[in-house]
Image (cartoon, rainbow, N blue to C red):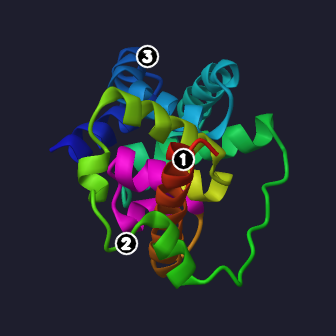
Amino acid sequence: MAAEIDAELLSRVARGDRAAFACLVRRHSAPVLRFARSLVDAGSAEDVLQETFLAAYRKADTFRGAESARAWLLAIARNAARRLHRRPSPVLADEEALAELGARAGWGQTPSPLAAAEGAELRERLAAALERLAPADREAIVLRDLEGLTTAETAEVLGIRPGAVKTRLHRARLRLMGALRAGGRGQ
């Protein structure tokens, strides 16, 4: 139902309907802004939000409808963030073993990741740890775990294959848990 509403809104936007555009912005500005904040600093996130919806307004006629409007808008936001802040992302060592990542993430130890996620203090630590991740890791986690996109939608936004999304997301989650555990020890 939501997909059909968004497709109709974008069709109307392509014909110049400003009321439909306003509705589209209301429906999707919060997730676009959340995603933008995960990519750039808070001040620039507003710029990314504006650039995203300006581009969506100009290019509404290019929406294919094969993907969700939210995934399409998040892909636009990702590109806008890259244009605003062209900075090299750190290259992570490929030799980082999966077992090492799992150990740092606390696999097999208590408390479980879900139990550890409760409480305001942990939310602050989580936000700080997420900020310390490489942009590629942060994007994968925000799109799948916070915005709830499917693997296919995430692949579309990131411009990679679904299998690569699964690999990137798995490693990103392990790195996030490792950063949380390291942060909890005062490091």
The residue that mark 2 highlights is: 107
Q: Position of residue 84 (x, y in %)?
A: 78, 34
Compared to residue 92, the image places residue 153 above or below, namely: above
Q: Position of residue 163 (x, y in %)?
A: 47, 81
Q: Amino acid at mark 3?
A: Arg
Q: Are marks 1 and 2 in contact (CB under 8 Å)?
A: no
Compared to residue 142, the image places residue 140 above or below, namely: below
Q: What kind of element bears circle 2? A: loop
- Residue 151 inside the magenta-drawn segment: yes
Q: CA distance from mark 3 to mark 1?
A: 52 Å
Is 146 on the left or on the right of 87, as rendered? Answer: left
Asked whether 62 or 169 is in front, the reply is 169
- The disc placed on residue 185 is 1
Q: For the residues carrying marks 2 and 3, which lies nearer the camera in this image?
A: 2
Q: CA distance from mark 1 to mark 2?
A: 17 Å
Q: Is residue 165 visible?
A: no
| Residue located 57% across and 31% down the image | 37
Q: Amino acid at mark 2?
A: Trp
Q: What kind of element bears circle 1? A: loop
